[in-house]
Image (tube, rainbow, N blue to C red):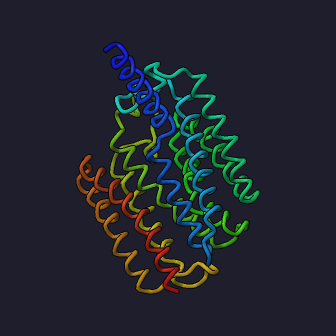
Amino acid sequence: MQITSNSRTVNVNISAVFNDFKELTKVGLSLSVVFSSLAGYLLAVDKIHIPTLVMLAIGGYLMVGASNAFNQIIEKDTDALMKRTMNRPLPTGRMHVSMALLIAISFTILGLVILYSINPKSALFGAISIFLYTSIYTPLKSITPLSVFIGAIPGAIPFMLGWVAATNNFSIEPGMLFLIQFFWQFPHFWAIAWLQYDEYKKAGFNLMPMGQKNKKAVVQIIIYTICLLLVSIIPVLKLTGSFYIYPITAVILLLLGSIMLFYAVKLYKNQTNKEARQLMLSSVLYITLIQVIYVADKFLH
């Protein structure tokens, strides 16, 4: 009877540790970033090389996991002030900072080694992503709303990283993928910042454009949404090298993007959390589906 009890305790402890590990590295977010990298890779290749695809997935996951871990180490005290984050492993003391740091450093080193084994440029962009996210974006969050612009840079790297991993080359095609994910982040993140405005304020963060939660901020959201839609269909003009799309694909993307724009306009009119949440969810749908659509279009060429 005692053995069974001890066994259950061990299982519960292992499960708790694993859950804390997942929360520290933000598994859901990390996997979505890996999805973007894999989409970028598929857009670049004519023949899929499975070992490279696997290394890209693992290396990309480790890079994002490391960035998230470093971020939570730096923001341990501010995370304790917000309901959304106060139950994370570090604020609650379930995980010691030294353990989180060990995970972050190990992920960084291992991730860079794996990406370097694909090609040096992939490792370079991976290193740039971690540096900007942890050393510039995270500290700036408590200083200026302009931190969002800095954070959009590492956030836009994964999509283009897949292309670079496939070609060992940074040219107009991965540059275009970078721009698409770069512009996408503003309406997406500002919708989140709208929803979490009061919580962020408790922690000393003010991430809305111009620091205000008002119609002027939503104007910025609308502008960046329109920019995103335009940038997303530029490949139809065949000015972006080997990355191009059919006209019907461009129409589909515009229709899909119009959902985001619709909720952005609704947010301007009503200024409620309901519209902000709808905008945030539609932005996730948009970035996921356009990557799938780009890949499908490419294999129809």
Which quadrant is the N terminus positioned in? top left
Q: Is 61 situated above or below 301?
A: above
Residue drawn at 37 percent across, 69 percent down: 257
Q: Nearer the viewer, residue 284 or 296?
A: 296
Residue 34: x and y in percent read 53, 55
Q: Is 22 situated above or below 254?
A: above
Residue drawn at 23 percent across, 53 percent down: 270
Residue 7 shows in this picture: yes
Residue 77 shows in this picture: no
Residue drawn at 56 percent across, 60 percent down: 37
Q: How many marks?
A: 0
Residue 250: x and y in percent read 43, 80
Residue 146: x and y in percent read 54, 45
Residue drawn at 50 percent across, 25 percent down: 76
Q: Nearer the viewer, residue 124 or 78?
A: 124
- Position of 98 with respect to 216 (left or right) is right
- Position of 144 with respect to 252 (left or right) is right
Residue 111: x and y in percent read 66, 46
Q: Is 144 situated above or below 247?
A: above
